[in-house]
Image: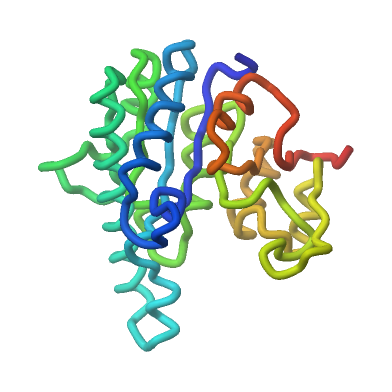
Amino acid sequence: MAYKRILLKLSGEALAGDRGYGIEPEVLSRIADEVCSIHQKEVEIGIVLGGGNIFRGVSAATRGMDRVTGDYMGMLATVINSLALQDALEKRGVMTRVMSAILMNAICEPFITRRANRHLEKGRAVIFACGTGNPYFTTDTAAALRAKEIGAEVILKGTKVDGVYDKDPMQHADAVMFKHVSYIEALKRGLRVMDATALSLCMEEKIPICVFNINVPGNIERVVRGESLGTWVTLESH
């Protein structure tokens, strides 16, 4: 394995599969199998899940809902996804802790950096729920923040496409995928790597990002092995 400690960022939509809403059991099972596989190779794993498969605060705000209320509802959606993944992982023998940025002691632990690092050192997978715990901040920003706090060597962002393109590949057949791009170029060109806050934090802390297709079986392990896959975002474009 090329990395000892990683931060895996998965969108909520990744769990929905082709249904587009909710949690698809087959997809959840496959992702859990892949996480279990790299965990068995002694890779320490932190995971941040989005909640867009259940509720998206920004979309609700455009339809008249208060943005703060919508964002808190979105945070609760990430807890549902986190508990589902925890259950799937523990059924495979991977001890897993869900740590929430918002207190809900009956179902998950409060996020404390030292405790999170201790769990990782003991070989437990740690799922970080509720984003940063603050409205207006995305789970991308939470992923960048948690990656820094746990000392992750890399952020692996699983998406529905193969990497980062110069335009939406779903709408443009001539879209070109980058193999490498710098943080600055991604910010200047408005590339859909992560939101600007998350990207700026990664740039400041020199945390490399790999954007790859989560829907291709085995891709998580391929990236952790160091294979050339997806798009890499680093200080310099190659």
The reply, left or right, for residue 110 in relation to residue 178 is left
Q: Is residue 72 above or below residue 128?
A: below
Q: What is the count of numbered marks?
A: 0
Residue pushed farthest bottom? 64
Q: Is residue 13 above or below residue 147?
A: below
Counting from the top left corner in percent of width and height, residue 155 is at 58, 36
Q: Quadrant of residue 94?
A: top left
Residue pushed farthest left? 106
Q: Quadrant of the N terminus?
A: top right
Q: Quadrant of residue 82?
A: top left
Q: Residue at x 31, y 57 (%)?
A: 22
Q: Residue at x 35, y 73 (%)?
A: 68
The reply, left or right, for residue 198 in relation to residue 135 is right
Q: Residue at x 89, y 37 (%)?
A: 238
Counting from the top left corner in percent of width and height, residue 76 is at 27, 57
Q: Residue at x 61, y 54 (%)?
A: 194
- 86, 198: nearer the viewer: 86
Counting from the top left corner in percent of width and height, residue 144 is at 54, 44
The reply, left or right, for residue 99 in relation to residue 57 is left
Counting from the top left corner in percent of width and height, residue 59 is at 43, 76
Q: Quadrant of residue 219?
A: top right
Q: How is the image coloured?
A: rainbow
